Amino acid sequence: MLTVLIVSALLFDFLNGYNDSSSIVATVIASRAMSPRRALTLTALSEFAGPFLFGVAVATTVGRGLIESTAVTLPVVLAGVLAAILWNRVTWFFAVPSSSSHALVGGLMGAAILAAGPGAVHLSGLIKVLLALFLAPPLGMAAGFLLMRLILFLAQLATPRINDWFRQGQLFTSIGLALSHGANDSQKTMGIITLALVASGALNTFAVPLWVIVVSAGAISLGTLLGGWRLIRTLGGRIYTIRPVHGFAAHIAATGVILGAALLGGPVSTTQVISSAIMGVGSAERISKVRWEVGQEMLQAWFLTIPATMAAGAAIFWIIHRLGY
């Protein structure tokens, strides 16, 4: 079962890259700062480097801070991962950006509670995770709004040629965003695999091995390289008509929030933060141009994610248990 779990966790990581990481390049592609192929390649390389530069604090939160150690078994962890994968596929089918982070947290909680009762969830760890998940989007929106206001003030006498500067600047901001995403999102898989190794007895204490960092970073990078094109369209064009200055501001705002969360050990949703940053940037220029109905669709999906994946995690754990594992 350990092998199945590791493969499932890496599949989750790959799909996370395929779905969520595409949001990193959406603004770059929509503003025509880079070609899709170049943007995805650059993002994938930066994603891989992220965990090596900024540590594994998020992996520790996911793997050790959420579920009581006595409730951690291979069936519980496997059920949580499979629930997250299932939810991500459902939201992908309908081209709705969802949160892999919410899905994984919900799946693990549902499986653990069915296996060992409500006491299986660390209340302090749950509060930390939920604060990170739900505070990050409004912070991203506020940062995008304030940064765009500042740029508009500083550039009010600039000529249209300043757009070329913003277009070139997106090369660097997209690298920063990809690094921060790699430093946050791939760590969730690292935490899951390390948790499974501890539960199986392969590790005595929770410490992320180097090979786990490498394969997790590689899986999310590969997913990024292949890209989720339908979500790129949603994030890059349907929320707000993107120009280089918007992409530049949204990248900086989102990078600050995601990287800050990674350093503090808080798992966040990159898709949520970037979407919120785009809305903040758009509303700073003209509120009426922001397609709020698209944001409302995303918000409904995000709030539904944890209850739905808790139910899925519990159901999958029940099936695994009935099969005799």
Image: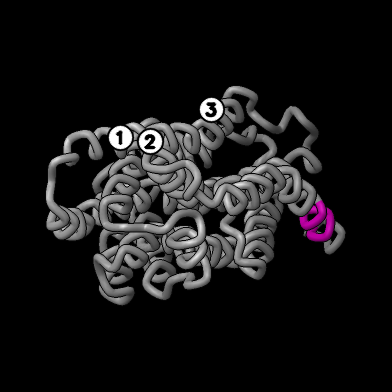
- The answer to which of 94 and 215 lies nearer the viewer is 94
Q: Residue at x 53, y 27 (%)?
A: 128
Is 304 located above or below residue 2 in the figure? Answer: above
Q: Nearer the viewer, mark 3 or mark 1?
A: 1
Question: Between marks 3 and 1, how big is the CA–CA gap?
Answer: 31 Å
The residue lying toward the viewer, choosing from 17 and 205, is 17
Q: Assign a secondary structure to mark 1.
A: helix
Measured Cα–Cα span from mark 2 to mark 1 = 6 Å
The Cα–Cα distance between marks 3 and 2, rounded to whole angstroms, is 26 Å
Instruction: Please tell me which of labels 3 and 1 falls first in the chain.
Output: 3
User: Is 325 rendered above or below residue 283?
Assistant: below
Q: What amino acid is found at the position of numbered circle 2 in the picture? A: Phe
Q: Amino acid at mark 3?
A: Lys
Number of numbered discs on residues: 3
> Which residue is identified by label 2?
145
Apparent side of residue 244 relative to residue 254 in the rendered image (left or right): left
Residue 200 is covered by the magenta coloring = no
Find residue 93 and report its image quarter.
bottom right
Relative image position of residue 20 (x, y in whole percent): 48, 58
Residue type at tag 1: Arg
Q: Is residue 13 left or right of residue 67?
A: left
Q: Name the disc covering residue 259, or none.
A: none
Disc number placed over residue 128 in the picture, else none: 3
Q: Secondary structure at mark 2?
A: helix
Graded by Cα atoms within 10 Å as few (under 14), some (14 to 19) or many (20 or more), the crowding at tag 2 reads many
Residue named by callout 1: 149
Residue range (magenta): 315-320
269 lies left or right of 257: right
Residue drawn at x 33%, y 40% as measured from the top left: 253
Camera-nearest residue between 235 and 52: 235
Magenta region includes residue 319: yes
For the N terminus, the quadrant is bottom right
